[in-house]
Structures are given as C-alpha cells and as structure tokens.
Image (tube, rainbow, N blue to C red):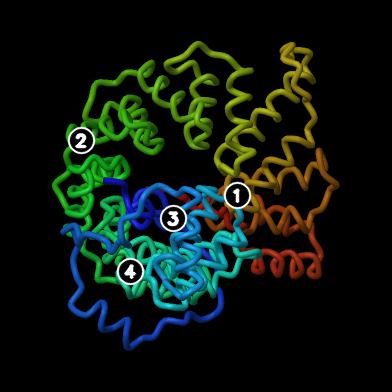
Amino acid sequence: MNPTRAESENSSELLCVEARPKIGVVAPRSYVDLTAFALVVFGLSGCVHAPRTPSTSQSIAPSRPEQIRTWETAANRGDASAQFNLGFAYEDGDGVPKNTAEAFKWYCRAAARGYPQAQFKVGRFYHSGQAGQTNYAEAVKWYTKAALNGVPHAQNNLGFMYRNGVGAQKDSFKAFAWFSMAARTFPDVGVTLGALYELGEGVERNDKEAFNCYLRGANRGVSEAQNSLGTAYLSGTGVQTNYAEAVSWFQKAASQGNLRAQVNLAKAYVEGLGIAKNPPEAAKWYRKAAERGFPEAERTLGFLYLTGLGVPMDPVEAFRWTSRAAEKGNIPAQYNLGRMYLAMVAAAETNAASASGITTNISNAFLWFSTAAEAGLPEAQFMTAQFYVSGKGVARSIVAAYKWATIAGKSLPQAERFSEGLKKAMSPFEVKLAERLASDFVPRRIEEPIEVKLQ
C-alpha cells in the first residue's frame, strides 16, 4: 500500500530538532490561545516517551495526470484533503510542474478549512520564506493551529520558536510543553527535554529526569542522546560518575558520526578518562570531526600539530587547522592564531622564519587578539592592551590600553597590575574616559548556528 501524503510528511519535514540550548532573538507576541493551550498541556509532565501515531490523510495513489485532475475538481469544490494533496503535488513537482506559489495557495485553502497537515505546511512556508518572504509570527500562528490539532512536527517547531524567541516572545514553559508533546513521536526531541530538565528551563531542574530522557533516546540509537548520556556519566549528572560508561556511550555516538561525541571521545583518549591514554587515537577522532568542519576539533587538531601530541609536529598544519577554527568564530582558536602570528613575527625578526609562505605581519596578530578580546577572552584582552601600549600592529593609545587592561584585570591579576602601572602615566580625564569605556563593554555574542535536523 502506498504511503499517504501526511505519512510522507512525518518522515521528511521535521525542522529544528535541538540538542543543546541555542540563542534566539526576541520577536513579536504569539497568536497562541492560552485557554486552548492550557487544555492541551494539562497534566503534562516528565520526559514523555510513549509513542503516539500522528494524524494522517486518506491513502492516495502516486500522482499522475488523471489523479491531478481528480484532485483539482475536488479541490475547487472545497475538499480540504484534495486541496492539501494538490499543494503537495505542486510543491514536489509530482505529476505537475513544480510551483511553490501554487503549492502555497492550495495549502492555504486547505488550512483555512482546518486541515491539520496543511496548517503545518503554511507555517513551514512562512518559517522558511517559501511563502514569498519570511514571517515568523505567521509561522507561529499556523504552527499553533496544527500543533493543537496534534501535528508533532508543528509541536516541535513551536518548542524551538518559543525557546529561542523566534516569531514569539521567549516562553520557556511553552517551549518545554510543546517539546514534550513532540517527543511522543520523535525520540530525538527527548534530548532537548533532557537539556531543559538539566537547565531547569521551563520546568523545575531535575538531573535524574534529564538522565532518564537521555537514556531513553540513547537506547533507541539517537546519537545525540548517546553523547548526552556519556556527558552525564562523565560529570555525574543524575547518575554516579562512571568514566568507563561515559566512554562507552561516546564510542557509540561517535561511530554514528556525532561530532560532539567524536570530540568527547578524543578528549577521553588524551586525558585517559575511562580508557587508556592514546594520543594517536585521540588525533584520529579529532581529525574525523575536524574534516567535517567542527571548530573545536579543528582548533585542537591544530594544537596537536603544534605540540606533536599524537601526530608529527607540523607548524604549517597547526596554522591551517587553527585558522579554520578561528575563521568560524572559535574564540580560543582566535587567541591561538594571534599567538602563532606573534611567534612568526619574532622568528622573522631573528632571521629564523620558516619558509612556510605565511605572511608574518604583526597587524594580523593584533587582529586575532582583538577579535577574541571583543568576544570576552581575558587573555586576549590583556594582549590587546599590550599592543595598544607598544603601538605595534595598531596605533598607540594609552586610553584603549587601559580600557582593555581594566576589563582583563577582572579575571587576570597580572592585567590588573598592568592597568595600575598605566594609570600613573595618564591624566584624570584619560582615566575617566577609559574606565567609562571599560564599564560599557559587552562581550560580542558568538551565536551558535541553529541546527536543523530533518527526520
């Protein structure tokens, strides 16, 4: 028997499954009817794990010209199921030329007649911009209608939007409630529930319940749950610390290609936690994650090449991997890259520079130190202060130097002593200005990309 359109939806359209907290942007209020919402979530608690069959439309044969004509006739008479099927055909280019605008038109007609899967589709179109332009508030409106009608994809996406303040004001309770409902159908969402329990976000903190959520997902083969379970065993969150058990779960998740787990497994091999130290094996797992573009792995692989731990020492490879991580916003990598440029400048000044072909310009060192400083790394802030004093790579400025030394001095005693020395050479006006600049400083937020996982 051929799958229904709605069943196809359940296998291909899940958007924005989260594994860890993400940063969002506060947006306009939602359209949620709070009374209806309260009725839906009444009595909802714990990590939901009983699967529930999602609603589906009637079974249909594969699209063909005759079937399209039949749907068109029924759709024009107001049949919501036919309108939805016709929308799906135009979206997919199945039996008709692909036409997003036509698909959206038929989805809207079906949604207006209360067809749940069409309501989800309309929300999805507004969410993704397929409706002509992105409109997150409209996405929330239509996701809510679909979610209240039991569409798990819509429940998951609402959880994401309320958690991150996308299209609706942040509301941790609503986020938790909608994720809980979606988790009945999608095991991956249980990882998000575990994270919410662990953080006490939208629900009272409960490490044991977080552990249970991770365990259920891990036993179902969800790699992110396996990694989170390994992390729980590593830290003793909701369970007694057990390094060997942590490594076991990291290995399972890493073998499925989970990047976080590959890095965690590599760390275990470096530190000898739950497994014998094995730097070459650590380098292997760091490389696997680095080659797929994971910044933390790229940075650490660069460090391994710099120190010769588990790999042959190779400054050029160290520079290459560190640069890749720094350019993706990895703050420690940005600081390390600044140090590398500084070392190359020093080597060039003593005629000992390697023939690597890398430009040894001290302004490059300042660029990366200042970038990491703006992101809030105290060591980079202290280095930036010293650059402003020396006037190398940047115009000399005792005010800027004092500003950065003051900020770094909150964490580093040596930076605090450095700022005290600078103060003696400054006028009262310069001191007041620098202190004002320091007090106004807000670290640049490094927003982690929101993960989109189709299921």
Question: Relative to residue 435, is residue 391 depicted above or below?
Answer: above
Residue drawn at x 67%, y 47% is 371
Q: CA distance from mark 4 to mark 2?
A: 34 Å
Q: Classify mark 4: helix, strand or loop.
A: helix
- Observer-side mark, 3 or 4, equals 3
- Relative side of 131 to 6, left or right: right
Please state which amino acid type lies under the numbered disc 2. Answer: Tyr
Instruction: Read off the residue under disc 4.
Output: 178
Of 28 and 271, nearer the camera is 28
Q: Classify mark 1: helix, strand or loop.
A: loop
Q: Label 2 near label 3: C-beta < 8 Å? A: no
Mark 3 neighbour density, 10 Å: few (under 14) some (14–19) many (20 or more): some
Question: Relative to residue 306, is residue 352 depicted above or below?
Answer: above
Q: Tell which circle, 1 or 3, labels the residue nearer the N-terminal end.
A: 3
Q: What is the x, y in percent for residue 14?
A: 40, 54
Count of number-bearing discs: 4
Report which quarter residue 233 is drawn in: top left
Q: CA distance from mark 1 to mark 4?
A: 36 Å
Instruction: Read off the residue under disc 1.
Output: 97
Q: Tell which circle, 3 or 4, labels the residue nearer the N-terminal end.
A: 3
Question: Relative to residue 205, is residue 408 depicted above or below?
Answer: above
Please state which amino acid type lies under the numbered disc 1. Answer: Pro
Q: Tell which circle, 4 or 2, labels the residue nearer the N-terminal end.
A: 4
Instruction: Read off the residue under disc 2.
Output: 243
Of 21 and 143, nearer the camera is 143
Q: CA distance from mark 3 to mark 4?
A: 14 Å
- Observer-side mark, 1 or 3, equals 1
Q: Tell which circle, 3 or 2, labels the residue nearer the N-terminal end.
A: 3
- Observer-side mark, 1 or 4, equals 1
Q: Classify mark 3: helix, strand or loop.
A: loop
Instruction: Read off the residue under disc 3.
Output: 15
Please state which amino acid type lies under the numbered disc 4. Answer: Trp
